[in-house]
Image: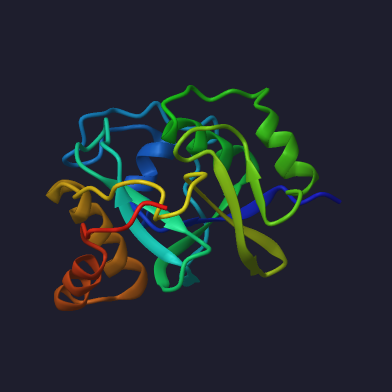
Amino acid sequence: MLPSHLWYVSYGSNMSRRRLGCYLAGGTPPGSMRTYAGARDRTMPTADHAVTLPGSLYFAGESRTWGGGVAFYDHDSPGETAGRAYLLTIGQFVDVANQEMHRPADPDDPLEEVLLTGLPGERHQAGPGHYETLVRVGEHEGLPMLTFTAPHGMYAVPHTAPRPAYLAMLAEGLREAHDWDEERIEGYFEARSVQDQPIR
């Protein structure tokens, strides 16, 4: 029997449960300039847990939702990235990914079939967009753990500073999932702030 669920691993603002809730049930996150339509299945996750991923978090681009840079994950660079894994249906995961790319939910999205039959390899590029590259980052309780990020690495683009409202959502998720205090959260952000990164 093919699995119907997977673990969606967030390393950005979706670490906040109420932020993820806007992707699933619809709504406007605090400080956001965008209202989300929500997923076809609006059920909140029945399980979640903290994870630490191998690889680096960096901020780049200019968000249409928050302004300023947004979080991306480079699985191939040294470092550690804090995250939160949510148990979602495959359909919910696809709907979250579509909303990340400012597209409506699509029951005929080919990505859903790819995930239902098993992700081919550790990485799958569903499209050219910022969050259309899927990376398998592990397995938990027999189900794959997947995240999405940009197709390029952290040294391929200039880094940009995130806005306070966006960082506040990340901080909320780090407190909820990892039980970090403000000092540790501030240090985590400072270590990943805008630097003179060489573009390779």
In this picture, is 37 found above or below 134? above
Residue at the far right: name it: 1
Of residues 197 and 42, the one drawn nearer to the viewer in this rendering: 197
Q: In this view, does 123 lie to the left or right of 132?
A: right
Q: Is residue 177 left or right of residue 195?
A: right
Which of the 4 quarters of the picture holds residue 58? bottom left
**Which x, y percent locates residue 36?**
35, 29
Q: Which residue is drawn at 40% across and 58% down?
A: 11
In this picture, is 137 found above or below 4? below
The reply to whether residue 18 is visible in this rendering is: no
> How is this picture coloured?
rainbow
Which of the 4 quarters of the picture holds residue 7? bottom right
Q: Residue at x 71, y 47 (%)?
A: 4
The reply to whether residue 12 is visible in this rendering is: yes
Of residues 138 and 106, the one drawn nearer to the viewer in this rendering: 138
**Which x, y percent locates residue 63?**
27, 36
Of residues 190 and 95, the one drawn nearer to the viewer in this rendering: 190
Q: Which residue is drawn at 29% across and 76% down?
A: 179
Q: Residue at x 63, y 54 (%)?
A: 6
Instruction: Say how many tags the image has.
Output: 0
**Which x, y percent locates residue 181?**
19, 77
**Which x, y percent locates residue 19?**
32, 46
Of residues 25 and 179, the one drawn nearer to the viewer in this rendering: 179
